[in-house]
Amino acid sequence: MVHVEVQSEYEVDFTKRIHIYNSLIELRHDLPAASLVILGDDRPTWRPQEYVSTIWESRTTQSYRVVKLLDYQNQWSVLSHSTNPFAVMVMAHLKTMATRENARKRLEWKTRVTRGLLEVGYSEQEIRNLLRLVYWMMRLPENLEREFQIQLDKFLEEKEMPYVMMPCEQDAMMRGILQKSREAIIDILVLRFSSVPEEIADRINKLKSESVLRDLLRRAVTLASLSDFSAVLDQLAPAEDSSGDRYN
């Protein structure tokens, strides 16, 4: 089993959570699990690689492979000429972080990354998948999204490429991501507490905020009881944004 964890922000007890996830995977599937951590945060020195817990003569340790996306900032030429689909993901992520306060600059980089992936030599299906990924990661204000689409359509016409990315595809992808998060929370609660009251399950299935669901997923792993989880749900649900989070 391979456990891949993508983390985009600093977290105090991150190593403990990775250890818990790894243990739950092994418990559920009765197979050893290797954890791979991809760090997409903006702290160059934060590189958690090992969990250690000691009590009396007992000692628990877990080490895992860590990939820091910031390390690729100085490898742009390598990334832009690579045919590895993950290179596009890394470029989109790095430029999304770098343009958080500059939407016009993000439009410029979104256009460059998109044109680059169209010229590298991916298959039609790979291009389709990667365009969706870039569209989702490098979100822009509505007016700039339209400008991006116009530029992309013009580029595709010049290159005689038939595929045109539709904005609605991104929304469908986000709905799928949210649904998978809801299912993961319920699965963990069932694994830990045998069953989940219908009321709690219904409330989870109505949540539309990516950040709230991400927080609840962590709480589902660490909280001691369903009543504690329900209390956290009471705190988070009223503040939930019905429009959902966006990658920003």
Image: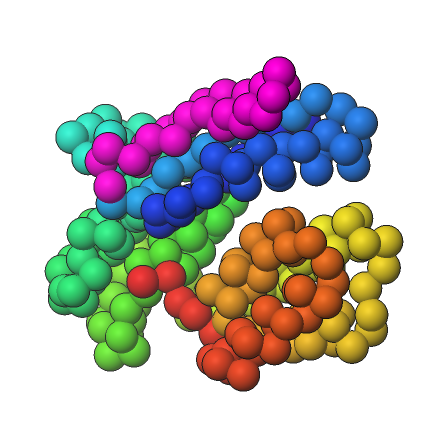
- Whether 11 is drawn above or below 31: the answer is below
Residue 23: percent from left, percent from top = 67, 32
Residue 177 can be seen, yes or no: no
171 vs 132: above or below: below
Whether residue 220 is visible to the viewer of this picture, yes or no, is yes
Q: Measuring from the top left, give residue 120's x and y in whole percent.
A: 31, 35
At 40% from the left and 47% from the top, the residue drawn is 11
Question: What residue span does the magenta drawing correspond to?
Answer: 43-69
Left/right of residue 50 with respect to residue 158 in the rendered view: right
Q: Please check the rendered image and state whether residue 62 is part of the magenta-colored stretch, yes or no.
A: yes
Q: Which residue is rendered at x = 50% and y = 28% of the image?
A: 51
Q: Residue furthest top?
A: 57
Q: In which quadrant will I find the N terminus?
A: top right
Residue under the point 31% across and 58% down: 138
Compare residues 228 and 10 and report the one nearer the observer. 228
Front residue of 123 and 196: 196
Seen in the picture, residue 32 relative to 29 is either above or below; the reply is above
Q: Nearer the viewer, residue 57 or 87?
A: 57
| Among the 4 quarters of the image, the one containing residue 148 | bottom left
The answer to which quarter of the image holds residue 198 is bottom right
Can you give x and y, in whole percent of width and height, for residue 139 in the image? 32, 65
Residue 188 located left or right of residue 56:
right
Q: Position of residue 15 (x, y in %)?
A: 48, 35
51 vs 248, nearest the viewer: 51
Residue placed at 57% from the left, 53% from the top?
A: 218
